[in-house]
Amino acid sequence: MPQRNDNLMDKITSLAKRRGFVFPGSEIYGGLANTWDYGPAGVELKNNIKQAWWKFFVKDREDVVGIDAAILMNSKVWEASGHVAGFNDALIDCRACKARIRADHLIEDALNMKAEGMTPEDMTKLINENKIKCPVCEKIDFTEARKFGLMFKTFQGVTEEDKNIIYLRPETAQAMFVNFKNVLNSTNKKIPFGIAQIGKSFRNEITPGNFIFRTVEFEQMEIEYFINEKDWKKLFEYWQNEMAKWLEFIGIKKENYSIREHDQDELSHYSKRTIDFEYDFPFGTKELYGLAYRTNFDLMSHQNSSGQTMEYFDAENNRKYIPHVIEPTFGVDRTVLATMIDAYTEEEAPTSDGKTEMRVVMKFNKNIAPVKVAILPLSKKENLSKKAKEVFDLVKNEFTCQYDESQSIGKRYRRQDEIGTPYCVTVDFESLEDDAVTIRDRDSMKQERVKIEELVEWLKKAF
Ligand code: GAP
């Protein structure tokens, strides 16, 4: 069980840096707010999550296909989707310390109520009436809440004129809508079917930190599932179950997440029903994933704006209609964070001299562990290194593998525990005689002697 105490986030952030999961962005220049870089262990973890998701929701299904669209899209996409007019947060400034804060978060933290969807005027009133203090300097001296657009703007071409403004996408979803007909025509899919994509999204967020939970640049894994309107209720329920199965697949414990229904006034402009999968982060219970019934809002808007038809022809019933959409959406970075929190374990472990010591071990689900097998020669002696490298060459084709011969074996075990490597394979002097190695299990710490020629098969069975 992870220790869900106050300093769990500090422990995870420090382990993330120490072991190469996540580093602060642009660190040597003092950083850049709300940006993070994935290190050697982090990129493997993140890639494993994305690959597992793609297999789970695209490759293993007949009714979902993938795309990989451009991040930069024609600005008309964001006008039609409603993002240019409506995708903003109400921000409030503290006159005393100049802190800029999201007004809904200020209210939620101070009054323990949901404020998303309220108008800036109502939020200002609530903040004033309740004499809410600035969380940074504790003064009560706020400006009025005002709306700020969340989309990053940039320019295409050589002049910085308005007509050249383009946006970095704030969600991957719109590419699935604008390519709906392309995918339909090139695959002959029949409704219901889905289009999936994994990719970067960008939002100019004002955030209170919380590591990689809310960043300005992040990755999403999204599915737009096109349906006949009459089926929306049963398919919404179906996708809720699929999302729960995914969480189980990556090893997120059931007791650590829950489902929250959005109130009517909290719903996004496109949604008729939304639920959040909320995870118990150490800094509060917050959104991990979302599931929304987007109706036919997006396809209809794009049809109206572009003048191109978005209709689907239902040959069985000889009728045309604009499909409705169920959207399961998953944040990659929040998945990384939740799996790290779920995996983080401190426990007593025996030492070689018969005593015990505390060890930190990341008990990742084996499917997503950054490194699957570590090959560790007992010493740096030449003949041992040679044998160990032979073992490494044998295993590396099948599993993400790491070769490590620096420091004592105890320290190397601790290091592999902290990146969550399920199996450590030790090559010792006996290996030179009996062509066998010792496999150490990350969780039970039990050791087993296995013939080198049987090692790959042994590991395949274990995963
Ligand atoms: N297409 C629908 C959509 O974008 P959203 O709830 O705004 O819905 C979907 O975002 C998911 O993307 C969230 O559940 C979360 O996992 C992730 N996400 C959103 N904003 C994020 C941010 N600033 N940093 C990290 N992840 C974010």
Image: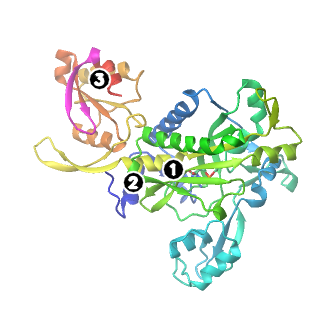
Q: Work out whether 120 lies above or below 173.
A: below
The reply to whether the magenta stretch includes residue 164 is no
User: Does the residue tagged 1 have its C-beta within 8 Å of any atom of ligand 1?
Assistant: yes
Q: Tell me the residue at 81%/45% (across/down).
A: 302
Q: In the rendered image, which residue does mark 3 sit on? A: 388
Task: Count every numbered label the image shows and give the total.
Answer: 3
Question: Around disc 2, counting alpha carbons within 10 Å, would you say few (fewer than 14), some (14 to 19), or many (20 or more)?
Answer: some
Image quadrant where one finds the C terminus? top left
Question: Around disc 1, counting alpha carbons within 10 Å, would you say few (fewer than 14), some (14 to 19), or many (20 or more)?
Answer: many
* Residue 320 coordinates in the image, percent (x, y): 82, 34
Labelled pair 3, 2 in contact (Cβ < 8 Å): no
Is residue 74 in sight in this rendering? no
SS for callout 3: helix
Q: In the rendered image, which residue does mark 2 sit on? A: 12
37 displayed left or right of 21: right
In front of the other: 433 or 185: 185
